[in-house]
Image (cartoon, rainbow, N blue to C red):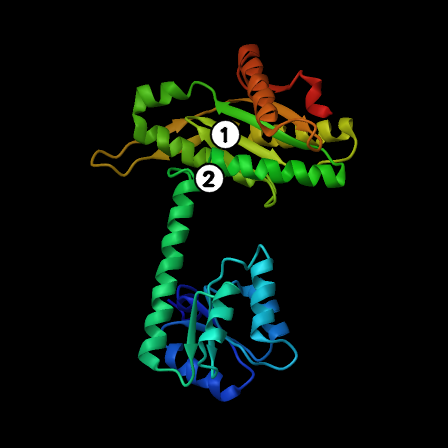
Amino acid sequence: MTEQSAATTLPTLLVVDDQPLNIQVLVHIFGTDHHVLTATGGAQALSMCVDQLPDLILLDVMMPEMSGHEVCRRLKADSRTKDIPIIFITVHDDPDEEAACLRLGAVDFIPQPVNAAVVRARVQTHLQLRQAIHQVWELAFHDPLTGLPNRRLLNDRLAQAMAASQRSRSFGALMFLDLDNFKQVNDLHGHDVGDLLLLEAAARLTQCVREVDTVARFGGDEFVVLVSQLAQDADDSRARATTVAEKIRTAMSRSFVLSTNSKTPLQVEHRCTVSLGISLFLGRGSSSNDVIKWADAAMYEAKAAGRNTIRFARDQSALK
C-alpha cells in the first residue's frame, strides 16, 4: 500500500487556527495516525470543508477577519457540512464561552494549552460516535443487500426532486421496474444466486443514470429510478425519459454471469428482461405517493403486455 492510499483510510481532521505554533502542536499530536489538514483563517477553512469534507474539525475561537463562532455558524447552515463535528480549542477557559460554543452546535470545548492525552481521547470519542451515527443512518436509509437507497430515502429524494421541479418548471420522471421471472432464478439456483443477480442488476442500473439521479431498491426484485431535470417541454421530457429507459433495458438484457463462493461453487449464466413503467411529474401538482402509484401501475401494464416492455403512466394528472 502506498503512503497516499494509506492516508485515505485514516480519519481526516481539519485544524483551523491563525497561530502556526498552535497548528504545529495539534499536527504533532495527530499527524502519525490521522490525515491532518490545516487552515489559518475562516474563509480558507470553509472552502476546505466543502472540498475535503473532513471527519472532524478542531477550531480556534479568536481569529482575525472571521471568528470561529462565525465559521461554525456557516458550517452548520450548509447541508454539505452541517454534520461534521466541531471541537472548539481556545485560550478562553470560561463557562460562558463554552456554553456559547456548544449552543452554536459544537460537540466539545477544550481550553489551551491542550493536554495531548485528553485531546486525543476526546477526538477519538467523537470520531467513534460519528461512525456509529453513520452506520445507523446507513441501516435506516439503505437496502442492506445492494446498498441502494431504500423506500424511506427514495421518498425523501422524490420530494426534493418535486420541489426542484416546482422551482425550475422542468419535468422529472420516476421509473418503476422489476426483473421478469426473477422467482425462477431463486427456485432453480437458490437464493444465493438470486441475491447475486440483484447485486449485479443494481450495479448496472446505477451505471445507466447520472450521479444526480437516484436508483433505489423498492423491495424484492423491484427497483425505482428517479431522473430529475429532464426538460420544460412535456414531449421532450417524455423522449428523454424513454432514452434512459431504453438504456436500462439494453443494459439489463446483457447476459449475467453469477458465481457463488459457497462450499460447492456454482456459476450460472442468466439472461434477464425487465418490465418498466414511467410516470412523469412536474412540480408539486401531485403527491409523491401518487407519482409512485402511477409508475407502479404502468409497470404492471408493461408486464401484462409482455416481457421487456416499457409503458408510461396513463393518468395524465401526473403531468399537472
Give the residue type at disc 2: Leu
From this view, report whether residue 211 is shown above or below residue 21. Answer: above
Give the residue type at disc 1: Phe
Q: Quadrant of the C terminus?
A: top right
Q: Check disc 2: other Cα within 10 Å, few if <14, some if 14-19, many if 20+.
A: many
Quarter location, residue 25: bottom left
Quarter location, residue 208: top right
Residue 282 numbered tag: none
Q: Nearer the viewer, residue 115 or 128?
A: 115
Q: Are marks 1 and 2 in contact (CB under 8 Å)?
A: yes
Q: Is residue 140 visible?
A: yes
From this view, report whether residue 234 is shown above or below residue 133. Answer: above
Quarter location, residue 231: top right
From this view, report whether residue 241 is shown above or below residue 90. Answer: above
Q: What residue is pinned by disc 1? A: 223
Q: Residue furthest bottom?
A: 21
x then y, percent, for residue 20: 52, 87
x then y, percent, for residue 161: 64, 38
x then y, percent, for residue 224: 53, 30
Q: Residue furthest top?
A: 304
* Mark 1, secondary structure of its residue: strand
* Mark 2, secondary structure of its residue: loop
Q: Residue furthest left?
A: 263
Q: Quadrant of the N terminus?
A: bottom left
Q: Is residue 147 visible?
A: no
Q: Nearer the viewer, residue 199 or 61?
A: 61
Tell me the residue at 57%/63% (across/down).
75
Tell me the residue at 41%/86% (across/down).
113
Left of 179 or right of it: where is 239?
right
Which is more N-terminal, label 2 or label 1?
Answer: 2
Q: What residue is pinned by disc 2? A: 148
